[in-house]
Image: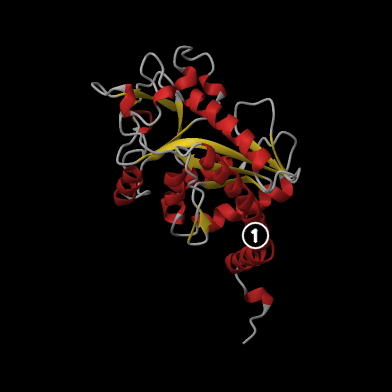
Amino acid sequence: MLVPPDMITVQSKTIFQINKYYAEKVQVRMGNIAIVLREICKIVQEVLREVEVQEPRFISSLVECNGRFEGLEVISPTAFEVVLYLNQMGVFNFVDDGSLPGAAVLKLSDGRKRSMSLWVEFITASGYLSARKIRSRFHTLVAQAVEKCPYRDMVKLVPDTTEVKLRIRERYTVQITPAFKCTGIWPRSAAHWPILNIPWPHPALVAEVKTEGFDLLSKESVILQGKNANVEGDAWLLHFTEAENRLLQGGYRKRCLSILKTLCDRHLDLPGAPIGYYHLKTLLLYECEKHPRET
């Protein structure tokens, strides 16, 4: 039965328009990005395979699971980041004393010999596992792998940066970042989350997120420059993407974020990219805390 237009409530009209936009614009965008991801992941996997041949300690963790590539994050329609998880962090202590905002260091455990670590040559005289040294070694390996891989005509290493960034088909940029996964602990610098006495996220969800933990990334950061010259280059950045993605599950949060990303691509593609996907995700999660009944 057809309902006369003047009888449709404002809310119903809004929901209809949102669903229409999602079907016509958002899903098309998601489909296009999925096609791009398959192409670039195939190339990156080949590069990482060659890296592993040269240096078995850098084992590729870029694998597809349930239609999703582990450790892959979409930064923009043409920019992506792949987190390469490293093994054997266990001989190091996680040190998060607040001296490096947003970062921490890994220090050789008391009584542990350097030779017990898989990454012995990257340990400083002070006993820190240097993020900078590992990144430098990985950069060299990737440069050699690019020259040897079958896709060398369409992929090149971006110069003039210590970051490992690949330029594919002169259109897409993929940053590959060495990292350690930290589970079962939660950093002191994030102890203020969540705010007490808020309905969302539920304590059970908070406990699950904190148990899953976070990542430590080896990458440059302007916030670390000049903070502590002695350990700045050895520090690892705290990274909470998996925790954030877990918080987005359920309700309409992921759907809402997809709509925001689509709007951003279509209307906020500005020089210098002042607004990125991460800003949108952070804003959305803040709004979920402020308006828990609407999550």
26 w.r.t. 155: above or below: below
Secondary element at image label 1: helix
Q: Residue reaching furthest left?
A: 111
At x 43% / y 38%, what residue is drawn?
86
Question: In this image, 51 relative to 114: left or right?
Answer: right
Q: Is residue 275 visible?
A: no
Quarter of the image where one finds residue 186:
top left
Viewer-side residue, 255 vs 219 = 219
Q: Is residue 168 visible?
A: yes
Could you say where residue 163 lies in the image, as x and y percent from the top left? Answer: 60, 30
Viewer-side residue, 193 vs 214 = 214
Could you say where residue 44 lies in the image, as x and y percent from the top left? Answer: 60, 46
At x 39% / y 13%, what residue is drawn?
125
87 w.r.t. 204: above or below: above
220 w.r.t. 125: above or below: below
Viewer-side residue, 115 vs 198 = 115
Could you say where residue 250 lies in the image, as x and y percent from the top left? Answer: 43, 59
The residue wearing badge 1 is 26
Q: How many marks do you count on the picture?
A: 1
Q: Amino acid at mark 1?
A: Val
Figure quadrant of the N terminus: bottom right
Figure quadrant of the C terminus: bottom left
115 w.r.t. 213: above or below: above
Question: In this image, 25 relative to 209: left or right?
Answer: right
Crowding near pointer 1: few (<14 within 10 Å), some, many (20+)?
many
Quarter of the image where one finds residue 115:
top left
Could you say where residue 151 lies in the image, as x and y percent from the top left? Answer: 69, 47
The colour mode here is secondary structure
At x 36% / y 18%, what residue is drawn?
127
